[in-house]
Image: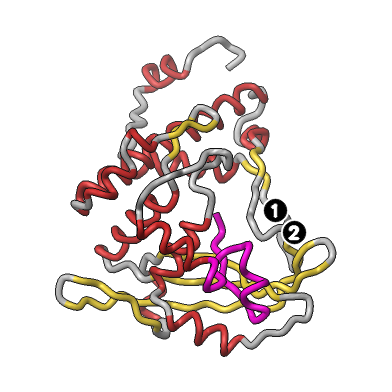
Amino acid sequence: MNSGISLKEILDKEELDLTLTSDEMVAFLAFLLSEAKEPQPEGDIVFSLTRKDKSAPQHLKRFVEGISYSFVSHITSKTRRLLSEDSIRFVREMSWELKDLNLIKMVSQDFLQEHNSWPCLPMFWTYKILLKAASRASIPFVIHAQFLDQKDHGYKVRDEEVLVFKPVKEGSKVSYVFSQPLESDMHKPVLIIQGAVCLDSRGLFCKTKWKEKILKRPVMDIVLSGAADHKQYPNEDIELNVADSEYHHYKNLAVNEGFSIDGCVEKFSRGSLRKNP
């Protein structure tokens, strides 16, 4: 960079072809963002029920010596915007393929918001599109739950559980049933939902009863409840007033069944699943 030679000049001189497919570009952008963050400390103590990784563009400097912080900061910001734009294109294409007029409306320009220069769509309907697309592709769901004891300065991981749900076709519809994974399943793509079971200060909990309760509900209901309970945009001040009965049904379900952060301890003393953002 200090030589004044542009990247285009190098590509032209060396006759390098760096053309990427759209899938390769998404993977590349996602990789950059995964490297440009400060993850929460790993270990037995969890300090927050919501995961809040911090942006750390300086981590990208380890790939190339001599580049400035302003350069990697610009790259990180632009990568976020490009990945957001591509993600929006993807969910909009999926909504048209699903031929669901309500989903098409909810991910349209009318519900687009900008946050730090990158575009955002409401979470619940985005999740619904992704879940429907996964269902149509017969992709299994995996719920990974951690059981947390409440401590003075955070939460201690006491135990964990993994539940696998496989797709079963019933005519044109696909439903998900709890099942034990086979060795042959280990090489298949899956959709992983990570969450926490928050225990009260008394630590009263029975994993068997929690598992029975979870299995009584369709796995789609659990995930959509978490998506409805979650803030719909990065900016919490943006209120989403929509007359979508299904959305409000899942918001109420999250509170009443203990699938929300606010209602988890109050509802469950015995445990509650919440979804990571």
Classify mark 2: helix, strand or loop: loop
Are the residues flagged by discs 1 and 2 in contact, CB closer than 8 Å?
Answer: yes
- Is 43 located above or below residue 93 in the figure? below
Disc 2 target residue: 47
Residue 147 x/y as whole percent: 65, 75
In this picture, residue 10 sits left or right of residue 272: left
Residue 242 painted magenta: no
Going 60% across and 23% down the picture, which residue do you hit?
A: 71
Labels 1 and 2: the sequence-earlier one: 1
Instruction: Give the amino acid at mark 2.
Output: Phe
Looking at the rendering, the stretch of residues picked out in magenta corresponds to 255-277
Type of amino acid under label 1: Gln
Using residue 259 as the reference point, say whether residue 14 is left or right of it.
left
Check disc 1 and report its element: helix, strand or loop.
Answer: loop
Q: Nearer the viewer, mark 1 or mark 2?
A: 2
- Snapshot quadrant of residue 47: bottom right
Question: Is residue 110 shown above or below 173?
Answer: above
Check residue 40 in the rendering and tell me which mark sits there, or answer none: 1
